[in-house]
Image: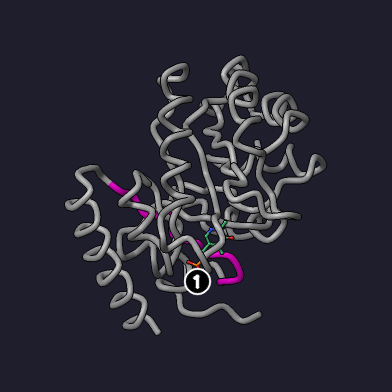
Amino acid sequence: MTGELARNYRKLQTALAACAAQSGHPVALLAVSKTHPAARIAECAALGQRAFGENYVQEALAKIAELAPLGLEWHLIGPLQSNKCQAAAEHFDWVQSVDRAKIIPLLAKHRPPHRPPLNVLIQVNIDGEAGKSGCSPEQAAELAARIAAEPRLLLRGLMAIPDPATSGNGLAFAQMQRLFRELHADHPSMDTLSMGMSDDFPAAIAHGATLVRVGSALFGRRNP
Ligand SMILES: *Cc1c(COP(=O)(O)O)cnc(C)c1O
């Protein structure tokens, strides 16, 4: 297993470096560790990976506590309910799934004073899929202004999960790139465009992704 993770990691780093060179901008890797135990995350950290993404606050808290001595960086990438905002603000370094106004003051209020401001991405439902998390592209500017007005939050950019069945054509990624540029004009603190997963990261990077979120290509397929 360890050998397989190391092979996957090296292969992924090589592919990311090639995509980054072709696109002319640096690309960082978020290792998506949902459903995988702390021991697997520690193995990955031993290979040099620092940033990990989790979908469920409750599941993540135990891993974050267990792995605290490693000083890893934790990103919440799953939907965030209001009643989980306190735990998210206390224990994560980034929340990538801010998609409505209501949770912004809650995250700000609960960010502990001894920690740096919470890094925040606005999640955009770029292809308007019904029932999916994310604000509409039209709502993003208002959310950005609200986040920017909170001293305990730092607006770092945008996140999207376009439908992988069609994302390879690059249209949704290109729309995200355009939206990112528009908002960046008003919010120079934005430096992160989080998009691209195991099956579509090359297309995402070609359209400006600076952070790709990769799970199965790294840790192997998740058990359902
Ligand atoms: C699970 C997940 C990923 C990783 O998906 P893979 O296809 O396993 O790479 C990325 N982003 C989000 C939001 C996810 O929930």
Q: Quadrant of the C terminus?
A: bottom right
Horizontally, residue 22 falls left or right of residue 69, namely left
Q: Is residue 7 above or below residue 108?
A: below
Seen as rendered, the residue at the extreme right is 83
Classify mark 1: residues with Cα within 10 Å, few (<14), some (14-19) or many (20+).
few
The part of the chain drawn in magenta is: 27-36
Q: In the picture, which quadrant includes the N terminus?
A: bottom left
Instruction: Count the numbered circles shown.
Output: 1
Q: How is the image coloured?
A: one colour
Residue 46 is situated, as x and y percent measured from the top left of the image, at 34, 64
Q: Nearer the viewer, residue 13 or 128?
A: 128
Is residue 32 within the magenta segment? yes
Give percent across and percent down for residue 101. Answer: 73, 28
Using the image as rendered, state which of residue 159 and residue 86 is in the foreground. 159
Name which residue lies at 27% across and 59% down: 16
In this rendering, the answer to whether 207 lies above or below 117 is: below
| Left or right for 53, reference 205 | right
Q: Position of residue 35 (x, y in %)?
A: 61, 70
* Label 1: element kind: helix
Q: Residue at x 71, y 42 (%)?
A: 87
Q: Nearer the viewer, residue 124 or 70?
A: 124
Residue underneath mark 1: 39
Q: Amino acid at mark 1?
A: Ala
Q: Which of 185/116 is in front?
A: 185
Q: Position of residue 178 (x, y in %)?
A: 43, 35
Q: Which residue shows up at 38% across the image and 60% down it?
A: 201
Q: Is residue 98 magenta?
A: no
